[in-house]
Image (spheres, rainbow, N blue to C red):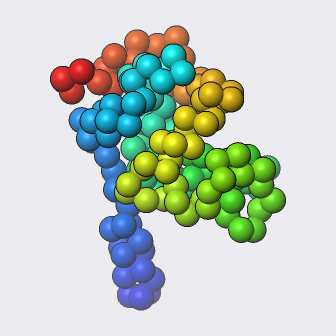
Amino acid sequence: MKVFLLVLFVGAAKAMYYTNLELVSTLQAAGMDGYAGVSLANWVCLAFAESSYNTNAIHYDSDGSTDYGIFQINDRWWCSNGQFPSYNGCGISCNQLMSDNIQAEIACAKIIVKQQVISAWVGWQLRCEGQDVSQYIAGCGV
């Protein structure tokens, strides 16, 4: 039991949870504000809706595919985990989406939104679309 708890705590320690301010700053520096017509507030809302700003978030879908990282990018279409057959539209390993440095995930999100618009993310549809998302950037100086 002690070994299991140690492994659990070590795994949890590797996850980074961005604050609104950190994420706004990172996304703004990456040119996400207005990218493909999507406001910075919508990008931040998307990250909250999909992962609660957790860079190591993983979600197992009912179709057998998996979503990875802060934007929950799917291995069926956008990244390769080496096990699940993938189109790999971003040309990356899914492991690259599990880093505290979210630059690879930002680059992939840009590809996704250019091809499918932001409504490709169900979390955005359910929690951000048609909502006042200004709260996600309030107090961030943008």
**Above or below: residue 17 compared with residue 139:** below
Q: Is residue 48 left or right of residue 24?
A: right
* Residue at horizontal 71 percent and vertical 68 percent from the top: 82
Residue 108 image-quadrant placement: top right
- Pinpoint residue 73: horizontal percent, then vertical percent: 60, 46
**Above or below: residue 122 compared with residue 54:** above
- Pinpoint residue 12: horizontal percent, then vertical percent: 38, 66
**Figure disc tally:** 0
- Pinpoint residue 36: horizontal percent, then vertical percent: 54, 21
* Residue at horizontal 41 percent and vertical 71 percent from the top: 11
Viewer-nearest residue: 68 or 131: 68
Q: Quadrant of the C terminus?
A: top left
* Residue at horizontal 39 percent and vertical 24 percent from the top: 33
Q: Is residue 34 left or right of residue 96?
A: left
Viewer-nearest residue: 123 or 142: 142
**Above or below: residue 82 compared with residue 137:** below
Viewer can see residue 81: yes
**Above or below: residue 104 compared with residue 49:** below
